[in-house]
Amino acid sequence: MKTIELKVNGIRVSREVSDNRRLVDFLREDLRLTGTKEGCSVGECGACTIIMNGKAVCSCLVLAVQCEGAEISTVEALHHEPIGLKLQNAFVRHGGTQCGYCTPGILMSSKALLDSNPNPSDDEICEALEGNLCRCTGYHPVIKSIKAVLKSVG
């Protein structure tokens, strides 16, 4: 067991975790932040995507002990940020949600993209989303949603 200290959604957190505790389990079970979903457990689907130190990462591939001193954002934090609210609203308005299971991960990948590149090209949007699998939308409504956000801030 090791005590880790990190910031999750802007709040300082200190918890004791085992050396093999995955970040996705830490977030969902220990912190009760259940918006982050687990789909594949091997980093292939992107459902568990969070933002860690400004980068989109699959939380199923990160150990909680690796997060010492990190800043983590989960889908629960989106409603506190203007761009997060715009993304959520655009996804609802343009049908980017469908069944919703992959939506938290796609939203987080989209937010990480817009945080680092406020005016991405179509190719850059597709590249940012390539780690997120969605079986329902065909990605067209997702891309349309992101482009709607670009228009609203541009």
Image: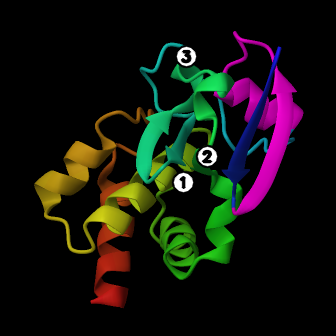
Q: Mark 2 or mark 3: which comes first in sequence?
A: 3
Residue 78 belongs to magenta span: no
Q: Residues within 10 Å of mark 1 (few under 14, many from 20)?
A: many
Amino acid type at circle 3 is Cys
Q: Which mark is on residue 100?
A: 2
**Residue 142 percent location from the top left of the image:** 38, 56
Left/right placement of residue 139 relative to residue 18 reads: left
User: SS class of the residue under badge 2?
Assistant: loop
Q: Can you identify the residue that label 3 sits on?
A: 40
**Residue 74 percent location from the top left of the image:** 64, 51
Q: Can you identify the residue that label 1 sits on?
A: 97
Q: Nearer the viewer, residue 9 or 82?
A: 9
Q: Residues within 10 Å of mark 3 (few under 14, many from 20)?
A: few
Q: Nearer the viewer, residue 122 or 33?
A: 33
Q: Is residue 83 above or below residue 67?
A: below
Amino acid type at circle 2 is Gly
Left/right placement of residue 95 relative to residue 124 reads: right
Amino acid type at circle 1 is Thr
Q: Quadrant of residue 97?
A: bottom right
Total count of labels: 3
> Which residue extends farthest top?
20
The answer to whether one can see residue 20 in this image is yes
Q: CA distance from mark 2 to mark 3?
A: 16 Å
Give the quarter of the figure containing the C terminus: bottom left
Give me the residue at 36% from left, 88% from top. 152
Q: CA distance from mark 2 to mark 1?
A: 5 Å
Q: Residues within 10 Å of mark 2 (few under 14, many from 20)?
A: some
Mark 2–mark 1 contact, CB under 8 Å?
yes
Q: Which residues are magenta?
A: 10-30
